[in-house]
Amino acid sequence: MTTTAYILAIVLDLLVLFIGARFLLQPRPAAAGYGVPAKPDGDAAYLTIKGLRDGTFGLLGLALLAFAGARAEAWFMLAVAIVPLGDTLKVLRHGGTKAVAFGIHFATAAVVLISAVLLFAV
Protein backbone atom coordinates (compact mmCIF):
# COMPACT_ATOMS: atom_id res chain seq x y z
CA MET A 1 0.00 0.00 0.00
CA THR A 2 2.92 2.35 0.63
CA THR A 3 4.03 2.20 -2.98
CA THR A 4 0.48 2.85 -4.21
CA ALA A 5 0.11 5.83 -1.86
CA TYR A 6 3.36 7.42 -3.00
CA ILE A 7 2.78 6.75 -6.70
CA LEU A 8 -0.74 8.18 -6.59
CA ALA A 9 0.46 11.29 -4.74
CA ILE A 10 3.31 11.84 -7.20
CA VAL A 11 1.03 11.34 -10.20
CA LEU A 12 -1.53 13.81 -8.81
CA ASP A 13 1.16 16.38 -8.02
CA LEU A 14 2.70 16.04 -11.50
CA LEU A 15 -0.72 16.21 -13.13
CA VAL A 16 -1.63 19.46 -11.40
CA LEU A 17 1.84 20.83 -12.24
CA PHE A 18 1.21 19.93 -15.90
CA ILE A 19 -2.22 21.58 -15.82
CA GLY A 20 -0.66 24.74 -14.38
CA ALA A 21 1.99 24.79 -17.09
CA ARG A 22 -0.66 24.25 -19.75
CA PHE A 23 -2.64 27.25 -18.48
CA LEU A 24 0.49 29.37 -18.73
CA LEU A 25 1.64 28.07 -22.14
CA GLN A 26 -1.66 27.22 -23.90
CA PRO A 27 -4.24 29.17 -21.93
CA ARG A 28 -7.26 29.04 -24.23
CA PRO A 29 -7.20 25.26 -24.91
CA ALA A 30 -6.54 24.70 -21.19
CA ALA A 31 -9.57 26.81 -20.25
CA ALA A 32 -11.77 24.92 -22.69
CA GLY A 33 -10.59 21.63 -21.17
CA TYR A 34 -11.30 23.00 -17.71
CA GLY A 35 -14.93 23.42 -18.69
CA VAL A 36 -15.22 27.21 -18.79
CA PRO A 37 -13.79 28.54 -22.06
CA ALA A 38 -12.02 31.87 -21.90
CA LYS A 39 -13.53 34.86 -23.64
CA PRO A 40 -11.68 35.69 -26.86
CA ASP A 41 -11.14 39.30 -25.79
CA GLY A 42 -10.19 38.82 -22.15
CA ASP A 43 -9.67 36.56 -19.19
CA ALA A 44 -5.86 36.76 -19.32
CA ALA A 45 -5.69 37.30 -15.55
CA TYR A 46 -7.95 34.29 -14.85
CA LEU A 47 -5.80 32.09 -17.06
CA THR A 48 -2.54 33.22 -15.49
CA ILE A 49 -3.87 32.94 -11.94
CA LYS A 50 -5.17 29.43 -12.63
CA GLY A 51 -1.82 28.40 -14.10
CA LEU A 52 0.19 29.81 -11.21
CA ARG A 53 -2.18 28.32 -8.61
CA ASP A 54 -2.06 24.84 -10.07
CA GLY A 55 1.68 24.96 -10.73
CA THR A 56 2.32 26.07 -7.16
CA PHE A 57 0.12 23.31 -5.73
CA GLY A 58 1.95 20.71 -7.82
CA LEU A 59 5.38 21.90 -6.70
CA LEU A 60 4.29 22.21 -3.08
CA GLY A 61 2.90 18.68 -3.09
CA LEU A 62 6.12 17.25 -4.52
CA ALA A 63 8.22 19.23 -2.02
CA LEU A 64 6.12 18.05 0.93
CA LEU A 65 6.38 14.45 -0.15
CA ALA A 66 10.13 14.69 -0.70
CA PHE A 67 11.09 16.70 2.36
CA ALA A 68 8.34 16.32 4.96
CA GLY A 69 6.96 12.85 4.26
CA ALA A 70 3.71 11.05 3.71
CA ARG A 71 1.82 12.49 6.68
CA ALA A 72 2.44 16.09 5.60
CA GLU A 73 1.44 15.19 2.04
CA ALA A 74 -1.72 13.54 3.38
CA TRP A 75 -2.76 16.73 5.18
CA PHE A 76 -1.92 18.71 2.04
CA MET A 77 -4.08 16.41 -0.11
CA LEU A 78 -6.93 16.65 2.38
CA ALA A 79 -6.82 20.45 2.29
CA VAL A 80 -6.23 20.77 -1.45
CA ALA A 81 -9.29 18.59 -2.23
CA ILE A 82 -11.28 21.78 -1.67
CA VAL A 83 -9.93 23.15 -4.97
CA PRO A 84 -11.49 20.59 -7.35
CA LEU A 85 -14.71 20.71 -5.32
CA GLY A 86 -14.77 24.46 -5.86
CA ASP A 87 -13.91 23.94 -9.53
CA THR A 88 -16.97 21.69 -9.80
CA LEU A 89 -19.16 24.55 -8.62
CA LYS A 90 -17.43 27.09 -10.87
CA VAL A 91 -18.00 24.97 -13.96
CA LEU A 92 -21.67 24.43 -13.07
CA ARG A 93 -22.25 28.13 -12.33
CA HIS A 94 -20.54 29.41 -15.45
CA GLY A 95 -22.16 27.40 -18.19
CA GLY A 96 -20.02 24.27 -18.18
CA THR A 97 -21.52 20.83 -18.56
CA LYS A 98 -22.40 18.50 -15.73
CA ALA A 99 -20.23 15.86 -17.41
CA VAL A 100 -17.13 18.05 -17.06
CA ALA A 101 -18.06 19.30 -13.60
CA PHE A 102 -18.61 15.85 -12.15
CA GLY A 103 -16.57 13.69 -14.52
CA ILE A 104 -13.41 15.76 -14.20
CA HIS A 105 -13.51 18.05 -11.18
CA PHE A 106 -15.63 16.11 -8.70
CA ALA A 107 -13.89 12.88 -9.69
CA THR A 108 -10.54 14.59 -9.13
CA ALA A 109 -11.62 15.62 -5.64
CA ALA A 110 -12.56 12.01 -4.89
CA VAL A 111 -9.18 10.72 -6.11
CA VAL A 112 -7.35 13.39 -4.09
CA LEU A 113 -9.27 12.32 -0.97
CA ILE A 114 -8.42 8.67 -1.68
CA SER A 115 -4.79 9.72 -1.97
CA ALA A 116 -5.00 11.45 1.43
CA VAL A 117 -6.48 8.32 3.03
CA LEU A 118 -3.76 6.11 1.55
CA LEU A 119 -1.05 8.49 2.70
CA PHE A 120 -2.47 8.62 6.23
CA ALA A 121 -2.32 4.82 6.25
CA VAL A 122 1.42 4.77 5.42
Image: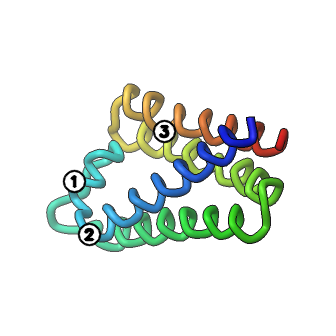
Q: Which residue is mark 1?
A: 29
Residue 13 screen position, x and y as percent: 55, 56
Q: Quadrant of residue 103?
A: top left
Residue 30 screen position, x and y as percent: 28, 54
Distance (Cα) linking label 2 and label 3? 21 Å
Residue at the image position 61 percent from the left and 64 percent from the top: 62
Foreground of the two, 96 or 12 = 12
Q: Give the vertical position of 117 relative to 42 (above or below).
A: above
Distance (Cα) linking label 2 and label 1? 10 Å
Q: Give the vertical position of 99 relative to 77 (above or below).
A: above
Residue at the image position 51 percent from the left and 40 percent from the top: 89
Residue 113 screen position, x and y as percent: 69, 38
The amino acid type, in three-letter code, at marker 2 is Leu
Nearest-to-viewer mark from 2 and 3: 2
The amino acid type, in three-letter code, at marker 1 is Pro
Numbered circle sitting on residue 59: none
Foreground of the two, 82 or 55 = 55
Q: Earlier in the sequence, mark 2 or mark 3?
A: 2
Mark 2 touching mark 3, by CB under 8 A?
no
Quadrant placement of the N terminus:
top right
Q: Which residue is mark 2?
A: 25
SS at badge 1: helix
Residue 98 screen position, x and y as percent: 40, 27
Count of marks overlaid on the render: 3
42 sits to left or right of 52: left
51 sits to left or right of 122: left
Q: Residues within 10 Å of mark 1 (few under 14, many from 20)?
A: few
Q: Earlier in the sequence, mark 3 or mark 1?
A: 1
SS at badge 2: helix
The amino acid type, in three-letter code, at marker 3 is His
Q: Which residue is mark 3?
A: 105
Residue at the image position 62 percent from the left and 49 percent from the top: 9
